[in-house]
Amino acid sequence: MGGFSFAAPLLLAGLIALPLIWFLLRQSPPPPRAVRLPTLKLIAAAEIPPPQAARPPWWLLFLRLFLIALIIGALAGPRWQQPLTGPQPTRLTIIIDNGWAATRWPEMMAAAKDRVEALTAAGTRFAILTTAARRADDPQAARFVDADTALSMLGGLKPQPWNVDRAKAAEAVATGSDVLWLSDGVESAGAATLRAKIGNAEIMTFPAREPVFRAGGRTIAGYAATLARPADGPEERRVEILASGGEVLASDTALFGGRATVVRIAVPAARRGAIDRVRAGSGPASLMLVDGSGGRPRIALVDSGGDAPPLESGEFYIRRALEPHAELSMLSLVDAAASDANLFLLPDVAATAEAAAALLERVRDGAVAISFAGPRLAENGSALSPVDLRRGARAFGGVMSWQEPQVVGSFTAGTPLAGLPRPDDATVSKQLLARSNDPDVQLWATLTDGTPLVSARRQGAGLLILIHTSADPSWSDLPLSGLFEGMLVRLLPLADNADALDISAGAPWRLDRALTFEGRLAPPDNPAEIAADAWSDAIAGPETPPGIYASGDARRALNLTTLTGPAFAFAPLATDGLRPAETSAPPIDLGRWLLLAAALLFAVDVIVTLILRGAISLPAARLTSPAAAVTMALIFAFPLAAQEADGRLQLGYIGGTAQDAEIARGLQALSRELGRRTAVDPGIPARVSPGDKGLGRYPIIYWPAVARQSMNRAEAANIRAYLSRGGMILFDFGQPLGNGSGARRLLAPLGLPSLQEVTRDHVLFRSYYLIDQAGGGALWVEADTEGDSGRVAGVLIGGGNWPALWAGSSAVSAVRREAALRFGINAVMYALTGTYKADQVHAETLLDRIGE
């Protein structure tokens, strides 16, 4: 078949059914059923031969079978592929770059499939190799398959969000095979090895167009990132900061002048904790996952109100420990509760229940309050303490104490402080103790004698934490040691998630959700793990895919910036020794053209059927022979009289006057009454002009003669043609006819015959309702149109200002409006049915038969 193929060739089996369809279409219709109809008595004596069963002509059957064949052929998906002009290989290896830079993946797949389809007829065998780095347990080898299998393999490929390993892919290339390399256009370390292996192979490049992140991180105002792109010249790129649900929290434009730029995006303080990712394009390297590890939490340091020198105040040591890691604000207790901070540090702040009420409400909503012991708490206690404190402090190592100062004994596993080192030189000489053991209180750290150093308790969605010694050196050496900073830093992640208690160091990081090439987070295909001490050196790859890693309750993001790095720049792929690939034209889809031909034939079939049934009359043409095919070619050149697009009848009116709106309302009201009272359901009235060529579609046209009192010669000729074809015009002069009405001047160009006044015996007054007047004085029509002659009047001339009456806009009685509506209904029915009410030709014969 050369370059001609079908996407679903099995559907062509439907052509076998065409002979059966021919046989069914040629069969006679079922015999008529005998039904007793009382009115048949009127024609009982008449001899009416039964009609012969009609069969469509053979050429119409052929037309219908050909239409069905076209539909079957279109559904089978016919395509024409232009064959390649060059030599056709017996074996072809297609190498595809499917790493993070393959952002034009659909184009690469289309090129690969086009090449396979172009060589299908030649019987070429294909091997499909990819260059993205692979797991050690997932090697690849060249396996040559037929075209159908190759297409199936291509459909199952997908790009990967990590680097390519072209040197490893070169090992799988079979010798003695032609090679087509579909490249992402970015130079890499193994590219030279692959070029040396494939020699004078064909190459087709699809250079990346998306910017990628070099680095990025949170700032005090929001987020900042460095971007690199493949091209030069000025360019603008939109960078968005997204929440986990996809909501855009903030955005800005990255302005490129060269190949790199820096973008800084401000994020409202209240929404910085919701940052989940930053997006600058559609590729995986154009996306940055954001966790809490790089953030600077906002912390409120509550002023204790003391006047101690800096080196003797707890605020000084807290600031020194946390300022490199967080944003601290010194606030009063009231101002702290109203701030946007989510972590509160209270050095020796004895808060009463009333003073602490607002902050306790914040804690119940998810905030964390950390209190430090001190003389004030020892004397007065605090409503923000997780335990009920004993009055006074327990002292070690004093002249009145037999006990020695205590050192840190242990940190409880599964808590934020687990795994911290325990220095021997950090001793505690005073501490606060609880009145009783509360089962709801968690003990996070203890001294060597087992007494508490750090206690915590859930309060709603948040936490109350107490460090049982002071934040200044008066009660312990902790503020002077590195352990103090380590403890506070460990507690900082609680500002983002008060439920994240298992955030201890030392546990490995395990892949929780993997980043797909499309930028989505999904369950990983394979488990991945990074040792805690190896995290800083981790690189995204097949063994450690990019995504979100978890260690206990802590979360960290591994991004593709581990591949690109702060100095990354796009290097164009060298193509030395390679030749540009011959591009095959994309296959031509013939199915759409077959469907179009089938639709046109269906329209022809419908029109032919209507003509054969007499629904459409076509003068000088009888579709009873094959010559009708020539006639059908001319059908679309002759417009047929029709109603509006939805098939509904319309009433027309001559527009272009100041009365258009009132006329339209009146005719619309008349149309509604027609639909309600009769079988006629008109559409929206149409505004027309006397010179329009399509007046034949309107059975009756209203002419506001009081506003339009003239017509030119061409318009008069068009109106005469309309009347001669059975149209009807209602001329309304707005008042009873007489001198000064202008009727003679308006109607003279039409050359009307003699007129007469309508009487109650005229068929117009009996066409639907029995009425005796039209309103507005005398109504004039052509003479000899009462009904006996069979002639139908073409013009109705009066002066009733009927649209105002039909719409009810005139201040008239309901009786007069009803009379006007009945006249309007009669006029429309008269235009549609003519003199049928006056047909008494067979009355005597019908009465005689009824008498029998």
Image (cartoon, rainbow, N blue to C red):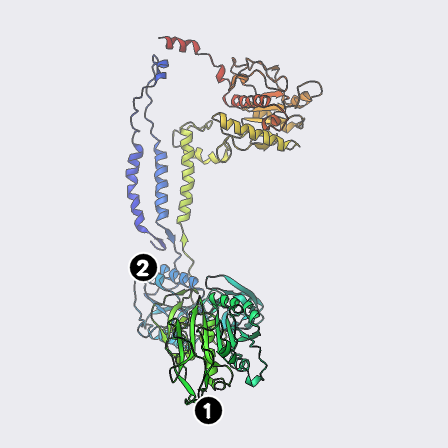
CA gap between label 2 and label 1 equals: 93 Å
Q: What element carries label 2?
A: helix
Asked whether residue 594 appears in the rendered view, the answer is yes
* Residue 833 horizontal/vertical position (percent): 49, 21
The crowd level at tag 1 (other Cα within 10 Å; few <14, some 14-19, many 20+) is: few
Q: What residue type is labelled 1?
A: Val
Q: Is 80 drawn above or below residue 307 in the view shown?
A: above
* Residue 752 horizontal/vertical position (percent): 62, 19
* Foreground pick, 248 / 323: 323
Q: Please state, as top left, top right, bottom left or bottom right, where the C terminus lies in the image.
A: top left
The crowd level at tag 2 (other Cα within 10 Å; few <14, some 14-19, many 20+) is: few
* Foreground pick, 816 / 319: 319
User: Image quadrant of residue 450?
Assistant: bottom left
User: Image quadrant of residue 651?
Assistant: top right
* Foreground pick, 761 / 608: 761
* Residue 768 horizontal/vertical position (percent): 51, 20
Q: Name the residue under label 1.
A: 399
Q: Mark 2 points at which residue?
A: 148
